[in-house]
Image (spheres, coloured by chain):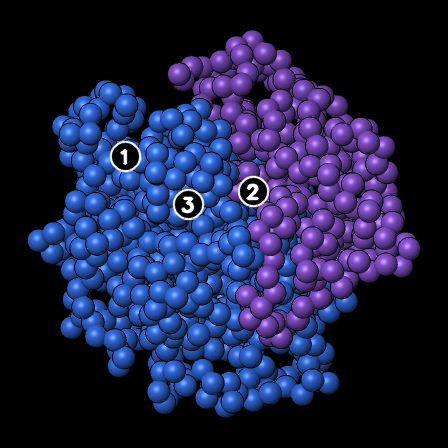
Chain colours: A purple, B blue
Amino acid sequence: MTKDIRLTLKIWRQEGPDTKGRLETYTADGISTDMSFLEMLDVVNERLTLEGQEPIAFDYDCREGICGQCGCVVDGRAHGPETATTLCQLHMRHFSDGDTIVIEPFRARAFKVIKDLVVDRSPFDKIIQAGGYISANTGGAQDANTILIPQDIAEKAMDAAACIGCGACVAACPNASAMLFVSAKVSHLALLPQGRPEAPTRVQAMLKAMDQLCFGNCSNERECEADCPKEISIVNIARLNREFIKAGLGYAD
Amino acid sequence: MQLDARIPSGPLADKWDTHRFDLKLVNPANKRKYTIIVVGTGLAGGSAAASLAELGYHVKSFCIQDSPRRAHSIAAQGGINAAKNYQNEGDSIWRLFYDTVKGGDFRSREANVYRLAQISNNIIDQCVAQGVPFARDYGGLLANRSFGGAQVSRTFYARGQTGQQLLLGAYSALMRQVAAKRVTMYPRQELLDVVVINGQARGIITRNLINGKIERHAGHAVVLCTGGYGNVYYLSTNAMACNVSATYRAYKKGACFANPCFTQIHPTCIPVHGTYQSKLTLMSESLRNDGRVWIPKNPGDKRPPQDIPESEREYYLENKYPSFGNLVPRDVASRNAKEQCDHSKGVGETGLAVYLDFKDAIERDGRDVIEKKYGNLFQMYEKITADNPYETPMMIYPAVHYTMGGLWVDYNLMSTIPGLFVAGEANFSDHGANRLGASALMQGLADGYFIIPYTIGGYLAGTEMNPVSEDHQNFGDAENAVHEFIGKLMAINGKRTVDDFHRALGQIIWDYCGMSRHNTGLEEARVKIQALRSEFYENVLVPGHEGDFNQSLEKAGRVADFLEFGELMVLDALERQESCGGHFNEAYQTEDNEALRNDDEYCHVSAWEYKGPDSDPQMHKEPLVFENVKLSQRSYK
């Protein structure tokens, strides 16, 4: 059932990467419970604009939970209180009239704040550049059915490949580690026969890049898995560790 | 202006091979001397940038998102077609070609579509080699499913996230080239103008969205892969940042815009529920494989779906189209849903919805089978609507989804500005008046992996070019014009927000140039758009500063272009006095309410040339010649 609720919002405002930020308080009246969280912020921004204030900067694009561009920490949880949900898919029916909601950017040493709730996640691209690919130039591929891939292996690879690169795992981790993100890509490619030739160099290069980009290390807190909107499992981190050890021992398989 | 499609001569099946042989080659050692600008990093842009860099060209790749991995191709759910015939159903390149031409209601170019069907098989091979985790059968072979407009299973898929997986494949190839220093990546940059020097596209002007800085980028060729213009309707299944600005500004620089009125309304989207709504969410068409579309037989029946007995339900698609049933093409399914709702048979709070019911499929195959096929789609539906589709039928309604129109390109995918190439949804080339499901991914990757890399070589090797620096006067002029325009938007300081104007424009276009159109409405829409545009320049309110991260300013520029482009759409719809595919003019329909084409007068591409702010654009015709298929009235009965 649709209804209107009134909320108090405490939102992080920060002009730029080098300025000091602060939480500011706003009242949001007449918020329909059918709205998505980002539509609620749209409504607040329309009002701020008409009042002559600067709207709150926040990232978004597809608004259907797949592009990975949106994301804030809502009441201490990356992407808010619902499990397996990106911020754009979180609906206001999960909040109650009179609630106070605290909205902050994803915080991590590796993710600089650009403005308000917008952060720079380009370090993720740099990790992929270090080895998150299979070296297959366009044009040389053999027929797609030449190599059989057992269904369960394809499914496991797909489970890992479902990562949207939003950065929630980093924001949720007390060490601001990117281990879940890295392990998802390492697993996806290491599980497939096409990804095996580069598996040892890939895992080593990606982890090295992660360290160099100022992400922390993994200490098995499991917060990443709890906040991941795509339910990427920490089984992938275990697989990454195995791949890493194998690579260190010089075994390709 | 004379349009030359440069279609190679010879038999259809040999055209592409002959053409590739005829194209001049750039010596491998010389490729690094050329800089190619690729705008957009979706399936077309990402795959083009990566493939060009692999060949040795220096590539500058631009995207509007914070990472090239986020382009809206990522949201494509259902799948990608290929003529592999792995299921032994008699599929072939010819059949895929024929289905695509027919599905496009005979308004596309035979030669382009045939090439697309040929390349479709290479795409699947390439993607598997890159590690795209396509669905597999128990034996480990690739699985397929069927899709609207086809009677064979030729669609490859990765759960309901096929676009994501294909895009991540192209993105990983692109990242590999960034690491190899053959691609320079420019994320959070928006194209604001194309720079033309001596009649050739030689660069672009962009705005750095983080600090507002206007930048100049020179190159030897420019490839626009900037997607479609569905957001002219405000509400669509497009991502929020999707816009027409890159292609529209190229149009203002001399690139013809083809068939802007060809827009596709997708039949299976979650219905609209409030004025605050920012976008519409698509439910993959693959759902129609197992879901049955129905409405109550009696108009105004407000009982909950489970209380309506079988005898009082109307499965209108199955009844009307016995051979294709729920799998009729998108335009047919959409128009039928609208027709039922117009007759007050719609369901839900607004009456603007029909049921898509999985009860029979769950009883037949078991819940786990349905969950495996559509689990994430069902989950997404439940998140948005709070209804559980395993227990109660989904409610769906059509929404704007894809735009078949785009910049006019020849067989080489080059626009009417030499050196300006256009790929993916941004061009008009392959889908005619209607696109079949699972064809967009195919086209984007065909253009990017397998067409542009060859045809750009042919252009560069066969064209004389002077060195151009970013200090050239044309760069200066373009940059000044961009500055001036931004200053103008910031200075208006009116009383209506950018979104408010966008919403108003979207309503006009949806009402008059949407699923069905008529001449009086179109005339009226033109006047309304002009009035709204005048008001925009007097009354829009853009907060913040020019030299800053300013999302309102970004949107203002895009809406300004939509306000001009919307009128071009309406003009095009008015000019085309027939119905075909997604363009349905109520005056032209068969007795069964199907689109009635006029092949004698309108079997052509309408390519519009910009003639300045105070004149109407000029229309050029590219006649469509069908030598291999017979034009027929589409029938899915």
Mark 3 highlights which residue? B284
User: Of the residues shown, which amino acid type is indicated by label 2?
Assistant: Ile
- The residue lying toward the viewer, choosing from A124 and B217, is A124
Look at the picture and state if B50 lies above or below B276.
Answer: below
Residues under numbered marks 3 and 2 in contact, where contact means CB atoms less than 8 Å apart: no
Q: Horizontal placement of A42 versus A203: left or right?
A: left
Mark 3 crowd level (few <14, some 14–19, many ≥20, 10 Å Cα): many
**Number of marks in the rendered image:** 3
Q: Judge whether residue A116 can be spotted in this image.
A: no
Mark 1 crowd level (few <14, some 14–19, many ≥20, 10 Å Cα): many
Please provide percent x and percent y for residue A143.
55, 71
User: Of the residues shown, which amino acid type is indicated by label 1?
Assistant: Val
Which residue appears at 41% of the width and 62% of the height? B87
Mark 2 highlights which residue? A66
Q: Judge whether residue A123 can be spotted in this image.
A: yes
Please provide percent x and percent y for residue B176.
72, 63
Please tell me the numbered disc located at residue B354.
Answer: 1
Looking at the picture, do discs 2 and 1 lie on one chain? Answer: no
Looking at the picture, do discs 3 and 1 lie on one chain? Answer: yes
Q: CA distance from mark 2 to mark 1?
A: 26 Å
Badge 2 marks a residue whose secondary structure is loop
Badge 3 marks a residue whose secondary structure is loop
Please provide percent x and percent y for residue B225.
53, 62
Residues under numbered marks 3 and 1 in contact, where contact means CB atoms less than 8 Å apart: no
Q: Which image quarter holds the C terminus of chain A?
A: bottom right
Please provide percent x and percent y for residue B570.
28, 54
Q: CA distance from mark 3 to mark 2?
A: 14 Å
User: Of the residues shown, which amino acid type is indicated by label 3?
Assistant: Ser
Please tell me the numbered disc located at residue B397.
Answer: none
